[in-house]
Image (tube, helix red, strand yellow):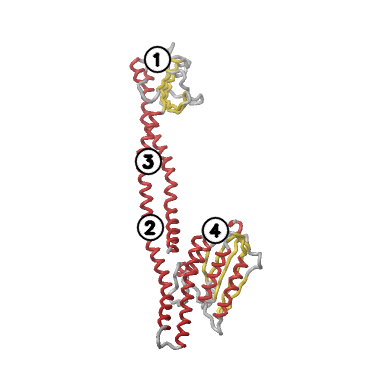
Amino acid sequence: MKLFQGRQRSLFGEILDWMLTPFLLLWPITFGLTWLVAEGIAKVPFDRSLQQSVTVLAQLVQSDEQHVSFQLPATAHLILHADATDTVYYQVLGGRSELLGGDAELPLPQDDEKLITDELRLRDDNLNGKPIRVAYMWVRVQAPDARPALVQVAETLEKRSVLAREIIRGVMLPLFVILPLSVLLVWLALTRGIKPLNELFLADAAHQLKTPLAGLRMQADLAQRSDANAQDLKQSLKQIGRASMRATHTVNQLLALARAESSGVGMSMQTCDLSVLTMEVVKDSLPRAMELRIDLGFEGPEPQHALMPGNPTLIKEMVRNLIENALNYTPSSDTHPGVVTARVCGDANSGWRLEVEDSGPGIPAAERERVFEPFYRALGNEVDGSGLGLAIVIEIAGKHHASVTVSDTRPDHKPPGARFSVSFQPVGNLT
C-alpha cells in the first residue's frame, strides 16, 4: 500500500516543516542573544573592579599650586599586577599631560569627549593590537590653568571571555540536549496524530473498492448456479461489467490523486494552451454526455490565445474530473435535457480562469468546502463515483498556484446548478 504511505509522508513532512523550521531558525538567534547577554553579564564584576582601582589611585594624586604628584606604594603596585590571567595597565597624567606614573603607551580618551572631574567612566580600546577595557577618571588639581589629572586603569579581556563562554556553555549545553529531544517528541506526536488519518483514508478507499468487488463476487456466484438460464447469465455478465468498471474507475482515481500529490517542485512545466486542453477533454467526454442526454458545450478563445505555463497532463486530468463531476450530478430527460458548459475566460494579464458549470441541484454553501475532501458525498446523493474527483482537482490546482471556488450557476433558479471556477495567476507571476 505504498500509495497511501506516500500520502502520509507528504502530510507528515509538511506539518513537520511548519513546526521545525521556525524552531531551527530561532536556534541561531537564541545563540546570538545568549552571547550578547553573556558578554554583558561578564563585564559587570570586572568593570566594577577596574572602577575601584581607579578610585584608589585617584586618592593617591596630590597637588598644590606649584605641581601635581603621584606616589604608588610597592604593595599597591603588587596588588595591581597580581592578576595571573589578564595584563593590567595603569596610567596617571598630570595637569600638563606629563606622565606621573604607570604605562605611557596606554591610549588616551577621545579629544572631543566632555571633560567632567571626579566621574568614573568606561570605554573599550586597543593596545598593541589587543582589545582592552579601560576605566578612567579626571581628577581636579589645585595648580592654576592646569587641566585635571587623568587616572586610567585597563586590562585585557581574557577573564571576561572565559566567563562569557562559561555562561554560554551553561545555557546552550542544555539546549543541545533539549533540541533533539524536542524534535523526537514532535516526530512521535505527529506520527501518532497522523496515523488515524491514514487509517481513515485506507478505510474509505477499502470501502469504495469493497462494494464493486462484492458485486462482482455475487454476480459470479449467480452465474455459476446450475439452474441459471441464458437471461440470468446475460444479466449477471452485465452487472459484472458495471462493477468491474466502477472498481477500475476507483483505482484510476486513486492513482490520479497519488500522481497529483507526488508532483512537486520538479514537475514538468511547459507552455500549454488552456483552451485547447479543455476542448480536447470536452470532445473525449461527448459520448458519455450524449448517452446521458446532456448538452455538453465549450466556450472560450481560439487556439493559441490562452497560453500559460503548466503541466498539460495534470491540467487535462483536472478538467476531466470537473466535467465528469458535472455530468454525474446533472439530471437530464428528453423533456428537460441537462446542460454542462466548460468555459475558458480571462486573459494573460489578469490570469486565465477555467469554469465548468451545470444545471444540476447545486451545492449548499455549508458543503462547498467539504466536497473537496476525498470520498466525501453530500447526503441524499446516490451518484456512482469514487468520491475522489474534486480532491484531485484541488490538488492539481494547488500545484499550479491556482484557487478553486464554487458558486451557483443560476442563483435565482431551482435547481441553481453549480459552477466550479479555477483561477490561475497572471502569466507573468508563473514564469
Q: Is residue 128 above or below residue 365?
A: above
* Residue 250: % across, % down: 47, 71
Q: Earlier in the sequence, mark 1 or mark 3?
A: 1
Pick whichever of labels 2 and 4 is earlier in the sequence.
Answer: 2
Given residues 16 and 164, the one toward you in this image is: 16
The amino acid pointed to by label 2 is Thr
Q: Is residue 119 visible from the viewing direction of this image?
A: no
For badge 4, the amino acid type reads Met
Q: State the SS at label 1.
A: strand
From the top left corner, tell me how far across and down residue 109 is, in percent: 47, 24
Q: Position of residue 117 (x, y in %)?
A: 43, 23
Mark 4 nearby-residue class (10 Å; few <14, some 14–19, many ≥20): few
Which residue is pictured at 44% across the width and 56% down the height? 13
The answer to which of marks 2 and 1 sits earlier in the sequence is 1
The residue beneath circle 1 is 70
Q: Which residue is identified by label 3?
A: 172
- Towards the viewer: 137 or 363: 363
In the picture of the structure, the residue carrying the numbered disc 4 is: 267
Q: CA distance from mark 1 to mark 3?
A: 48 Å
